[in-house]
């Protein structure tokens, strides 16, 4: 049975070496690549978010996760989760104890999600199989007050969710601060939207890309799948202008807030899919979202394109789009789809930089990769 409550941190270096050497052999079997840079994680308390199922044993609230390692799908009960941030571990017993003693909060309570930040904020989402009413809101406010009293140095908020319900007691986001080359960047992160799970490794990813684009200040950058502006904002100082696209409305709204918070003036983020952007660039379709944001694609001189796609990787049309650019920066959370996409991209480009970022410690093959490709002469 998998043990979620303990971590053998003494094995961290060995497991990372085994994982990267295995993956490196697979990449070298297919491609000519330089020796990769390897960026480590903190060995404990590295995840900024965690999700737990809830088991109600009478009035007692118990956290559990499902063990899928041997297909048994056993419930594994836990009181701590060292993989998660220290703040999540500090909050877990306090939240469970309070809800256990307040029936209005425990009835048909089935899941809890924690989202925390390096800057000390926490957003706790309580999920229910019942409609939440005024009595729940009143008791949830009491819980929030209790947590804020217990953790006066942290900013804590609560959300209640049920079928077709989302109840905010205050806000549905946290504000993270990431440090890149000794400069701090501030990001709004919204509940239920994508954020990098390992914040310290995210800082290393941003630093790596920033360092490898420092000589491109007279050119422009295109970013696809930009999320809340995580990369674009940190790279704004390296480029003349940046145009970024993202399909998620929530992420685009956060990105606009993040642009303003970081006083970035040379970045525009537009809600377009990669496919829609390709159509716009090929002048097959006109999009009001470009016109309304005063974006004229002909005014951009992009030598570099950056992509951080979902696990499914890139489709053929997007790969064909990337091949137009002199420099391709590909951030991937899935080595399998990355290898598949590189088979096509290396027809026109050579791999000039390669990095592994251990976003997901103690996993056999799950790792973030960074690849920089340069067009062959």
Image: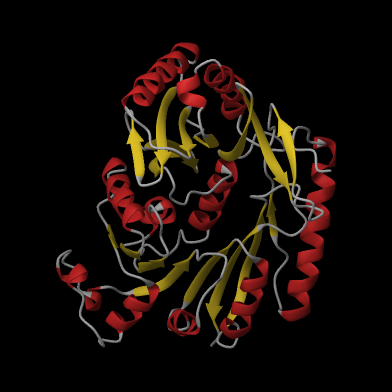
> Which residue shows up at 60% across the image and 46% down it?
201
Say how many tags the image has: 0
Please tell me whether residue 14 is drawn above or below residue 30 in the rendered image: above
Q: Nearer the viewer, residue 2 or 279?
A: 2
Quadrant of the image occupied by residue 223 = bottom left
362, 138: nearer the viewer: 138
Q: Position of residue 299 (x, y in %)?
A: 22, 74
Residue 359, image x, y percentages: 64, 50
Q: Position of residue 60 (x, y in %)?
A: 63, 22
In the figure, is residue 44 to the left or right of 241?
right
- Farthest residue in the top direction? 149
Report the front residue among 237 and 85. 85
Q: Position of residue 141 (x, y in %)?
A: 37, 20
Res 61 → quadrant: top right
Instruction: Report the residue at 39% width, 73% height from top.
Output: 274
Residue shown at the point (52%, 57%) measured from the top left: 209
Q: Which quadrant: the N terminus?
A: top right
Q: Is residue 27 left or right of residue 251?
A: right
Which color scheme is applied?
Answer: secondary structure
Q: Is residue 315 left or right of residue 46?
A: left
Q: Is residue 141 above or below residue 195?
A: above
């Amino acid at each position: 049975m998998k043990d979620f409550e303990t971590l053998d941190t003494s094995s961290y270096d060995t497991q990372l070496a085994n994982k990267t050497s295995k993956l490196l052999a697979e990449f070298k079997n297919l491609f000519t690549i330089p020796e990769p840079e390897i960026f480590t994680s903190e060995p404990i308390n590295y995840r900024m978010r965690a999700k737990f199922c809830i088991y109600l044993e009478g009035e007692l609230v118990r956290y559990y996760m499902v063990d899928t390692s041997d297909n048994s799908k056993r419930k594994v009960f836990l009181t701590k989760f060292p993989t998660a941030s220290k703040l999540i571990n500090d909050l877990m017993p306090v939240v469970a104890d309070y809800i256990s003693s307040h029936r209005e909060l425990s009835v048909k309570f089935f899941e809890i999600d924690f989202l925390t930040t390096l800057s000390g904020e926490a957003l706790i989402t309580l999920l229910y199989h019942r409609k939440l009413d005024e009595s729940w809101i009143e008791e949830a406010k009491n819980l929030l007050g209790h947590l804020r009293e217990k953790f006066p140095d942290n900013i804590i908020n609560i959300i209640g969710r049920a079928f077709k319900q989302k109840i905010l007691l205050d806000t549905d986001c946290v504000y993270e601060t990431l440090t890149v080359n000794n400069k701090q960047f501030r990001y709004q992160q919204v509940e239920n939207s994508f954020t990098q799970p390992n914040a310290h490794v995210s800082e290393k990813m941003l630093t790596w890309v920033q360092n490898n684009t420092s000589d491109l200040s007279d050119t422009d950058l295109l970013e696809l799948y930009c999320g809340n502006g995580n990369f674009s904002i940190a790279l704004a100082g390296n480029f003349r202008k940046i145009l970024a696209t993202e399909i998620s409305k929530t992420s685009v709204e956060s990105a606009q807030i993040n642009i303003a918070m970081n006083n970035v003036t040379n970045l525009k983020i537009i809600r377009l899919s990669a496919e829609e952007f390709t159509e716009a660039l090929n002048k097959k379709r006109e999009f009001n979202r470009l016109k309304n944001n005063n974006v004229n694609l002909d005014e951009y001189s992009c030598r570099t394109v950056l992509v951080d796609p979902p696990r499914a990787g890139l489709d053929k049309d997007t790969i064909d789009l990337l091949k137009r650019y002199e420099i391709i920066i590909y951030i991937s959370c899935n080595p399998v789809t990355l290898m598949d996409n590189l088979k096509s991209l290396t027809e026109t480009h050579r791999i000039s930089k390669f990095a592994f970022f251990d976003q997901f410690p103690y996993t056999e093959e799950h790792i973030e990769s960074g690849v920089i490709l340069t067009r062959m002469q």
